[in-house]
């Protein structure tokens, strides 16, 4: 479960907003806003609620792969979100539709293998005519059994 913090932002001299304070308790942050309004008389203070990430950042590999299995792009990305093994979507460009897949590994060879397994499984399960349909891709990925690549740790 991620923790929330309450950030007091405001400015006494311009439209530009600055972080003034950060609190774990929303009521204390709201009290800070009331006091700032009394001191500065400009009404430009507010409390913003933010979620603190607790996941460690990792380097994942991003692959763009065509329907035919051609790798169009391989690159590294910093990732600090959910810890599923694979995150995928289909991305349309003017010339092609790519499987866009993040794989939880720095090993590019392994990432390409995983992307290809996903591509083949999707085409075998849903057929060529559904390529380009992100909703069908989500159904394929998220209705796999617990032993699938989606749930397997490194």
Image: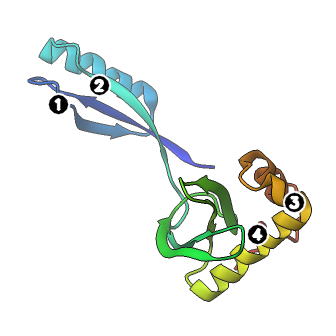
Q: Identify the element where label 3 is drawn.
A: loop
Rendered residue at 65%/80% (across/down): 112
- Find out whether the residues at labels 4 and 1 contact each other: C-beta distance under 8 Å: no
Q: Earlier in the sequence, mark 4 or mark 3?
A: 4
Give the label on residue 119, or none.
4
Reply above or below: 139 against 26: below
Image x and y of residue 110, in percent: 66, 85
Say which of 40 and 151 sits in front.
151
Q: Identify the element where label 2 is drawn.
A: helix
Left or right, 152 with reference to 33: right
* Residue that carries the numbered disc 1 in the rendered image: 16
- Find out whether the residues at labels 2 and 4 contact each other: C-beta distance under 8 Å: no
Q: Earlier in the sequence, mark 4 or mark 1?
A: 1
How far apart marks 4 and 3 lie (CA) works out to: 11 Å
Q: Identify the element where label 4 is drawn.
A: helix
Q: Earlier in the sequence, mark 1 or mark 3?
A: 1
Of circles 1 and 3, which is in front? 3
How far apart marks 2 and 4 lie (CA) works out to: 53 Å
Q: Earlier in the sequence, mark 2 or mark 4?
A: 2
For residue 65, which quarter of the picture? bottom right
Say which of 96 and 11 sits in front.
96
* Residue that carries the numbered disc 2 in the rendered image: 32
Rendered residue at 83%/51% (across/down): 139
Say which of 64 and 21 sits in front.
64
Image x and y of residue 146, in percent: 88, 65
* Residue that carries the numbered disc 3 in the rendered image: 127
Reply above or below: 29 against 153: above
- Callout 1 environment at 10 Å: few (<14), some (14 to 19), or many (20+)? few
Q: Earlier in the sequence, mark 2 or mark 1?
A: 1
Rendered residue at 28%/16% (across/down): 34
How far apart marks 4 and 1 lie (CA) works out to: 47 Å
Does any portion of residue 145 appear in the rendered image? no
């Amino acid at each position: 479960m991620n923790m929330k913090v309450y950030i007091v932002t405001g400015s006494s001299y311009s439209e530009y907003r600055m972080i003034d304070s950060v609190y774990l308790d929303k009521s204390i942050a709201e009290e800070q806003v009331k006091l700032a309004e009394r001191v500065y008389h400009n009404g430009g203070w507010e409390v913003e609620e933010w979620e603190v990430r607790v996941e460690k950042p990792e380097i994942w590999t991003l692959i763009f792969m065509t329907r035919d299995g051609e790798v169009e792009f391989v690159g590294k990305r910093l990732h600090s979100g959910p810890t599923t093994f694979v995150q995928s979507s289909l991305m349309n460009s003017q010339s092609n539709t790519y499987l866009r897949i993040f794989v939880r590994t720095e090993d590019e060879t392994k990432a390409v293998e995983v992307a290809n397994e996903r591509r083949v499984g999707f085409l075998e399960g849903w057929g060529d005519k559904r390529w380009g349909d992100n909703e069908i891709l989500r159904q394929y990925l998220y209705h796999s059994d617990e032993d699938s690549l989606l749930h397997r740790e490194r």
